[in-house]
Structure formats: structure tokens, C-alpha cells
Amino acid sequence: MVKAILTDIEGTTSSLSFVKDVLFPYAAQRLPDFVRAHRDDPQVAQLLEDARAVADGAGDEEALIAQLLEWIATDRKITPLKALQGLIWEEGYARGDFRGHIYEDAARRLRDWHGAGLRLYVYSSGSVHAQKLLFGHTDYGDLTPVFGGFFDTRIGGKREPESYRAIASEIGLPPGEILFLSDIREELDAARDAGMATTALRREGVTGPFGEHPVADDFDGVRPIED
């Protein structure tokens, strides 16, 4: 019996285009000035040091900025980069430059499932901070209260079964009582290998194949409980 739902964001609750065509370019355009303006802030300074370690030093500040921009362009899942992006997006949300995109069916069903007693969680390569910003600034209001927790790559890579076992341990449920939703087969495979139930989301721009995973075109097609 499913007692919790763990959902991806990009291509699942939210459009691929919002992340790739809005959030990524926004962060790339503003990252150089952001780093120069906030390099001495303790949080940013630590993230830059963490990024420098991943980049094997990356030379001076300009070289590090160039490396960060390259990681954005190639969609690298680098934890300190994701955290920096989240800080930049926070400024964008505060200024009203954009709102977090959530599909109508996702917003509605997440609230329905929460009301039915299902526990809801998010697992995304974007930082926890960025996740909360997205769900906190949608056209359907602040959706963060429906979630019991948020997970990012600090718990592990999304294509590694051990990450899903660690999430199940954090949630306090057996993996078999958790349903994972994603548009990426390798993530679904990893969750299944960890013992979770799975459903693939086949939204616009997503073609699969998804192997033996159940497939839904939207959240109305996901059936964790009979309703």
C-alpha cells in the first residue's frame, strides 16, 4: 500500500521548458555579477570553495565563473552550483521576474493526495532551497505546506539506488510503501531497484522509452490510491 509519494520536478510537476528556457538562462546571465557582489558572504564563499574543489582548483575567480557557466550550459548536477543557482533565483522570484511553473493537474492532485493523508516529498537535482522557491511561488499559491520534506543531490545521485534507500530511511517508511514519479527511466530504474513503486510521466517533450514502468500522461493518470 502506497503511503507516500516522492516526486521529481523537471518534466514531472513542471515543464522542461521552464527550467531550460527560463531558470537556467536567468542564472547564467546573472551568475558572474552575483559571484563578484557576494564573494565575501560566508554562505556564497563556502559554495565557491566547494565548487572550486569539484573543479580541481579552477584557477582564479574568473576561471571559476567560467567553469560554473560551463556547468550550467551542460546541465551538470554539481551540488554547489545548484545552491548558487537557488540563491540567484531567490532574487528573481522576489523581484517578480518569473513565477514557479507547476502543471494545473500536478497542483490539484498534490493537494488532493495531501488531503487524503498521503505523505508527499520532492527529490530533485535542484537544491532544496530552489525547490522550495519554485513551489512557494506558483500561480496556484504556495504549495510548500503539502510537502513533508525535500531532498536534493546531497543525499546522493538520482540514478543511484542507494539514494532512494536513504530517502526511505529519512522518511521512515519501507521503500515498498513509497511511489516515485519521474520522467527519466534511469531514475525510475534506480528507485525500483531500491524497492519503490514507480510511475513514469510522459508530458510534452518526453518520449521515453520507460521499460516496464507504469506510464501516465499527467498526474490525473497516477493512481496511488483508489479515488
Image: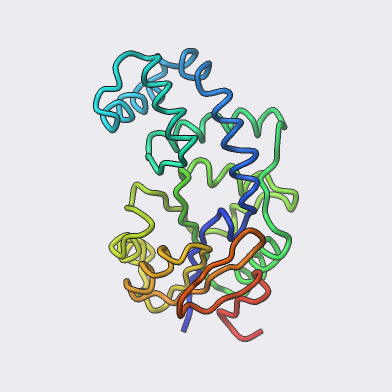
Q: Quadrant of the C terminus?
A: bottom right
Up-down: is 212 above or below 24? below
In the foreground, 94 or 64: 64
Q: Position of residue 73 (x, y in %)?
A: 49, 35
In the foreground, 136 or 202: 202
The quarter holding residue 158 reads bottom left
Q: Position of residue 70 (x, y in %)?
A: 44, 30
Residue in the image at 63% along x and 58% along y: 205
Total labels drawn: 0
Up-down: is 37 above or below 162? above
In the foreground, 43 or 74: 74
Residue in the image at 38% along x and 34% along y: 80
Colouring scheme, one of rainbow, by chain, secondary structure, one colour: rainbow
Residue in the image at 39% along x and 70% along y: 189
Residue in the image at 68% along x and 74% along y: 220
Q: Position of residue 69 (x, y in %)?
A: 46, 28
Q: Position of residue 111 (x, y in %)?
A: 66, 65
Up-down: is 93 above or below 217? above
Up-down: is 58 above or below 179? above
Q: In the image, 108: left or right of 49?
A: right
The quarter holding residue 100 reads top right
